[in-house]
Amino acid sequence: MTQTQQKGQKATIFVSVLTSYITTFTSSALNLSVPDIGTQFHISAALTGWIVTGYILSSSAFSVPFGRLADLAGRKRILIGGIGIFALSSFACCFAGSFGVLLALRILQGLGAAMIFSTNIAMLVGAFPPERQGGVLGLSTASTYIGLSSGPVIGGILNHQAGWHSVFLATALLSGVVFFAAVKLLPEEKKQEREIKPQDRDVKGNCLYVLTLGLLLYGFSSVSQGIHGWICAGAGLALLWAFIRHEQQAPSPVVQVRFFRENPAYFLSNLAALLNYAATFAISYVLSVYLQVAQGFDSQTAGLILICQPTVMAVLSPYAGRLSDRVSPFLLASIGMGLSAAGLLWFSFLEVETPLWFVITGLLIVGTGFGFFSSPNTNAIMSCVSREDSGVASSLLATMRTVGQTSSMALVTLVSSLCLGRHTFETASAGEMALMAHDTFLVCAVICGAGILVSAGRRGKKEAGRK
């Protein structure tokens, strides 16, 4: 390997690690500000959740189209564009004067995140041989969890000392640094060997995908707010059927449906990722509110408590990634899913007077489970496809993650509506908040239990699909 190639690999790791950090730092840091945002704009607890849901919905809907575009037009330019949009929208959020403006900017921020999600893992995988794939994915995953672990601490301190606007300002500054690093350090990509034809772009498929996922996620997130949610979800299901029919006939589909049909391990690994995120994403959000409203901690202290879970993830992920190069990643991911389910069931026993050690123990259990699930499961997915399809595979994995996260927030919104009604977090009682946390975690434990069955259904070692 030449010195230039080695420098290119190091630069790719550096940018991938930083982009994995900033996208997760923002979400985990902002969770500590949710009660204050709801109070400032005088909106209900259910509506406040859309500050998180709007970002995830946008990043879900656009990840796969940008992944397909990146495979055709070049991943570097899509990644750099995404970082730029993410940085500018984060900065604009600092000056949002109403809930509507903040929500619109969060959706734009999600668009930038979609461009990042659909390229950073694909670029990382493309820069290294298959035998080193698990190790470098472990580094990227560890960075994700460092973002999750530092987010509550830094976000809690910033929110407590300077208000929620400062969280967006910190994100914008950090994103700006990553943007210039990507422009200066990332190696140039090889030019396309063939001409890109109009049918390669699958414009109809991209439009159907965005509409389908947008309607489905918005509908399921809004079912607690009226009949319009059910109508949107139904329309999304109808469009899903039309999308699948179109993709089966398209000469260059945005989603290779055959991946799911011909490779059961690939299908089940993506489904396992979706169920795991659907079950676990709500933990940080619900506990941040529970600790502040039900137990009376300030945002700074709540952030220090929540750091336990992602810290364990960050420590275990590189080890689990390297281990998945030698041991079946399917087995490791199934063990991780089981531990996550155990932690969620543990949290379902939360009450108003629950001691702090009980909360910390649950965070450690879930953190261990997710640490052993994520890197091996990502390795399993990326090992099932060729390098030419790694962009779409990366964006599909990102979509599974964000769809799972949106589903998790939809569940929180529904349970919040049932338990708190139109109460804001400021007016809700400690008992109502504890009940909301209990019900949410109980349902999440059931979802994670289903994920154990899906993950354990995979057989054999990772499939040698990479060419």
Image (cartoon, rainbow, N blue to C red):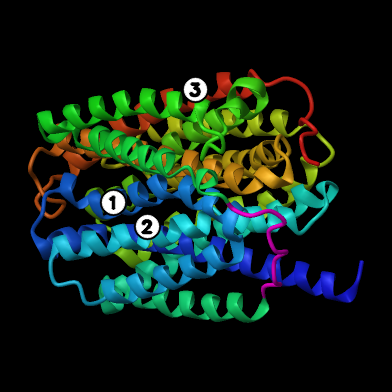
**Secondary structure at numbered mark 3:** helix
The residues colored magenta run: 186-196
Q: Is residue 107 above or below residue 77?
A: above
Q: Nearer the viewer, mark 3 or mark 2?
A: 2
Q: Residue furthest right?
A: 1
Decide which of tag 2 and tag 1 comes sooner along the chain.
1
Residue 87 as seen in the image, left or right of residue 397: left
Is residue 199 inside the magenta stretch?
Answer: no
Residues tagged 2 and 1 counted as in contact (Cβ below 8 A)? yes
Label number found at residue 110: 2
Instruction: State which quadrant residue 405 falls in.
Output: top left
Residue 54 is marked as 1
- Horizontal side, residue 146 vs residue 427: left or right: right
The three-letter amino acid code for the residue at tag 2 is: Gly
Q: Quadrant of residue 404?
A: top left
**Distance from the alpha carbon under mark 3 to that under mark 2:** 29 Å
The tag earlier along the polypeptide, 1 or 3, is 1
Q: Amino acid at mark 1?
A: Gly
Task: Between label 1 and label 3, give the one nearer the viewer.
Answer: 1
